């Protein structure tokens, strides 16, 4: 059974810092890994999707990497801003789980002005 | 091109009533997924549907919960005889159904059972 773990559970940083969020998964047989952002009381916004054949994806100040063999992904946020404050969720689609997403518990990020 | 739409956004039901949650997928998407987020917990898969077919319902509670995605109209998640433990945010996502299985989420329906 696929399990996804995110570390840390919460993170508080001053504005301007570069930071890294970690995600690990137990079964490396995946089709893709997605990073989402969730604001309080809101839905999920897709940030980046990395297919199993890819090593990384970039969008603006965000960079996500994937090491499928070791079951790890990182989300790098450069020059953090207060508007980046949200919960960041990592999710995978496993090769043996149909096309459903298995989510981690999330990292709650606070960027202080 | 409208995104995934869910309604109502907030729903209050008394114990024992029925709750109906609706989801309209993105244009061009024929695959719908329902996920539940209980308070202080992560998102958990419930059910995966194609038009007129349930593909995977392995995450659905065995009783009181059902889902459908008819040929015409939105997907419906139905909860009969709601209990306080059903209070949660219910999210719908849609996809084209093909690789890389990217899913797009709606804003969710927040169900409160009093």
Image: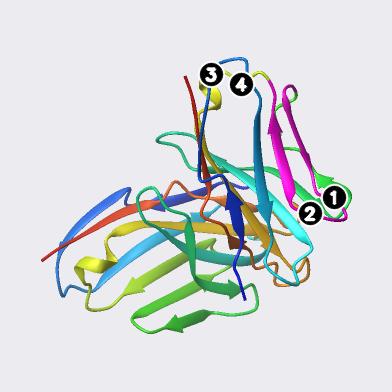
Q: Nearer the viewer, mark 1 or mark 2?
A: 2
Q: Which residue does the numbered mark 3 point to in the structure image?
A: B14
Using the image as rendered, state which of residue A47 and residue A39 is in the foreground.
A39
Point out which mark residue B70 bears: 1
Q: Earlier in the sequence, mark 2 or mark 3?
A: 3
Residues at circles 4 and 2 in contact by the CB criterion of under 8 Å: no
Question: Pointer 1: residues within 10 angstroms few (<14), some, or many (20+)?
Answer: some
Q: Quadrant of the N terminus of chain A?
A: top right
> Which is in the foreground here, disc 4 or disc 2?
2
**Image: magenta residue range:** B63-80
Q: Nearer the viewer, residue A4 or B113?
A: B113
Sequence-wise, the earlier of marks 1 and 4 is: 1
Rate crowding at label 3 as few (under 14), some (14 to 19) or many (20 or more) other CA atoms within 10 Å. Answer: some
Contact flag, marks 3 and 4 (Cβ < 8 Å): yes
One can see residue B43 in this view: yes
Q: Is residue A99 above or below residue B102?
A: above
Disc number placed over residue B73 in the picture, else none = 2
Residue at the (33%, 81%) spot, across then down: A61
Where's residue B24, x and y in %?
68, 57
Q: Sort mark 2 into few (<14), some (14-19) or many (20+) by Cα contacts within 10 Å.
A: few
The numbered mark, 3 or 4, whose residue comes first in the sequence reads: 3
Report the colour scheme. Answer: rainbow
Contact between marks 1 and 2 (CB within 8 A): the answer is: yes
- Residue B7 at x, y = what percent? 59, 48
In the rendered structure, find residue B82 and report the number of the disc placed on it.
Answer: 4
Chain letter for the residue marked with disc 3 in the picture:
B
Q: Is residue A73 magenta?
A: no
User: SS class of the residue under badge 3?
Assistant: loop
Q: CA distance from mark 3 to mark 4?
A: 7 Å
Regarding residue A69, the answer to whether it shows in the image is no
């Amino acid at each position: 059974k696929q399990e996804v773990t995110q570390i840390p559970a919460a993170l508080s940083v001053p504005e301007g810092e570069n930071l890294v969020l970690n995600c690990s998964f137990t079964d490396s047989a995946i089709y893709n890994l997605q990073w989402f952002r969730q604001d309080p009381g809101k839905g999920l916004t897709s940030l980046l999707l990395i297919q199993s054949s890819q090593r990384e994806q970039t969008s603006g100040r965000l960079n996500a990497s994937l090491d499928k063999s070791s079951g790890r992904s990182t989300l790098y946020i450069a020059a953090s801003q207060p508007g980046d404050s949200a919960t960041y969720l990592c999710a995978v689609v496993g090769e043996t789980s149909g096309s459903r997403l298995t989510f981690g518990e999330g990292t709650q990020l606070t960027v202080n002005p | 091109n409208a995104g995934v739409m869910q309604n109502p956004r907030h729903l209050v039901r008394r114990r024992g009533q029925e709750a109906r949650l609706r989801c309209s997928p993105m244009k061009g998407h024929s695959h719908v997924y329902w996920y539940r987020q209980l308070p202080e917990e992560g998102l958990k898969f419930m059910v995966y549907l194609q038009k007129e077919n349930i593909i995977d319902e392995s995450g659905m509670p065995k009783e009181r919960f059902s889902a459908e995605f008819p040929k015409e109209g939105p997907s419906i998640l139905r909860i009969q005889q709601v209990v306080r433990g059903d209070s949660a945010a219910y999210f719908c996502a849609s996809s084209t159904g093909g690789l890389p299985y990217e899913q797009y989420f709606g804003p969710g329906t927040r169900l409160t059972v009093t």
